[in-house]
Image: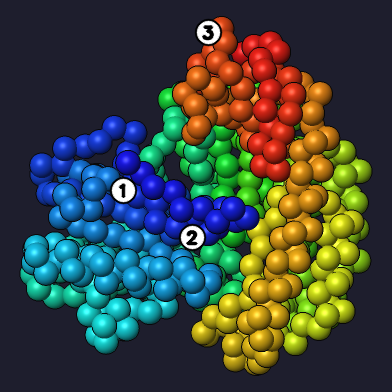
Amino acid sequence: MVEFLINKQHDESRQGESFLPDSESSGTLTGKVYIESYGCQMNFADSEVVASILKEKGYGFTADFRMADLIFLNTCSIREKAEQTVRKRLTEFRQVKKERPGLLIGVLGCMAERLKSKFIEEEKLVDIVVGPDAYRSLPELIEEAESGQKGVNVLLSREETYADLTPVRLNSNGVTAFVSIMRGCNNMCSFCVVPFTRGRERSRNPQSILQECRQLLEAGYREVTLLGQNVDSYSWQHSPEDPRVSFADLLEQVASLSPLLRVRFSTSHPKDITDEVLYAMARHENICNYIHLPVQSGSTRILGLMNRTYSRDWYIAKVQRIREIIPDCGLSTDIICGFCTETEEDHLETLSLMEYCDYDLAYMFFYSERPGTPAAKRLTDDIPEAVKKRRLQEVVNLHRNQSLKNMEKEVGKVLKVLIEGNSKKSTSHWFGRSDNNKVVVFPKEGNLCKGDYAEVKIESCTAGTLIGKLHNKTS
């Protein structure tokens, strides 16, 4: 049974999600692997890359860590709480290892890059430490660990994109899938560890992206989410003589594969999303009208300290442009409360920007200083935790009100919904999402199946779910 421990406000706080491929493998060749992932969508996509590499070497997979020969935690360093959770989990696994000395424990991803020496030398929690760009070396590192050595590779790369690997779809619903289009980040936001744990930006060959999307479509998948730390800076050029492929170009190429394939993307940096991307979305019905556009703060002064490279007014103008070109576009954001030196006036500016932008979804946190970031080196984390929490609660309260009002606007409409599976609360109801990323639940009728599109008349709602009934099957 896969467990989801999901913060109600943020996909990136998905904690402790264990995985199985589409069908569980017996894995008698080399042993069984248990993978538990934390953090952002990129981490979950990386776990699928890791599974692909290990499957090639004969490993099988299990959803029960007590049955595993290898335990891997794919980790996140974005917030202190995530690191604390992983550290606690590693301590629990070490207790299991005392009973089964042959068990190997490994840490993958961002924490591996940042805390390699602590994990292995000081705390002796793990046997294998592998950074985000070194997953190809896993088989050799496992062999080293089996011989009693510590397997470590946290080298960052300027070329690695894993473009030639076909990810093993873990815990898949068979309908939606992540497709990584680039790795790393060149933005040096002062609060963020990503450039230090994932390295510089590099884009993946568009042909390999299209091939992966085509394979997913042929396998019955009906939605792909193109992933990158900043997808709008995607850029590929095979040689100086060839035309450059921008993110807008790639988006149109993926959308053109089939009208049955929905296309989403995440994440967009406000400074990089272009009119060309917005017009591509407007031209193609199957490019979902939904944009995640992190603002972080509504104060121009705080945005400057965060090195976000835009002002409050610039961000508002970008939101206006989105709604001018795509009037019904869903909009979500990230907000950090209590960043260094934030005043009550700065906080009120965040609240007023939220009121103007009227977000459908907001991922909200109070500031957590991360060692090694520019903010940790140059700024003082001087806002008391009680103040951070109070400001966060005010942001959450405002968003809840906005979210409910936005859901109420959908009541009475007929929405095209992609069915992803059974409702969590009732197997007699379908669960799916609308084009603008709203969760829809409706009773099962007719001959609909998972992966079908359905027209659903919305009759009521909660702050997080639209409730309706089948209006007409569309495909």
Mark 3 — residue?
A: 447
Give the mark nearer the N terminus: 1 vs 2.
2
Mark 2 — residue?
A: 39
Dot 1 crowding, Cα within 10 Å, few <14, some 14–19, many 20+: many
Give the mark nearer the N terminus: 3 vs 2.
2
Q: Amino acid at mark 2?
A: Gly
Q: Nearer the viewer, residue 245 or 415?
A: 415
Residue drawn 63% across the image and 82% down it = 385
Label 1 and label 2: CA atoms lie apart by 17 Å
Vertical side of 378 occupied by 211: above or below: above
Q: Position of residue 151 (x, y in %)?
A: 22, 71
Which disc number belongs to residue 468? none
Q: Give the structural element (helix, strand or loop) at label 1.
A: helix
Dot 2 crowding, Cα within 10 Å, few <14, some 14–19, many 20+: many
Mark 1 — residue?
A: 51
Residue drawn 66% across the image and 42% down it = 464
Picture mark count? 3
Q: Position of residue 29 (x, y in %)?
A: 10, 44
Vertical side of 363 occupied by 2: above or below: above
- Residue extending farthest to the top is 446
Dot 3 crowding, Cα within 10 Å, few <14, some 14–19, many 20+: few
Label 3 and label 1: CA atoms lie apart by 35 Å
- With 356 as the anchor, is 172 left or right in this view? left
Residue drawn 80% across the image and 36% down it = 408
Vertical side of 45 occupied by 87: above or below: below
Q: Position of residue 178 (x, y in %)?
A: 51, 43
Label 3 and label 2: CA atoms lie apart by 37 Å
Residue drawn 79% across the image and 31% down it = 410
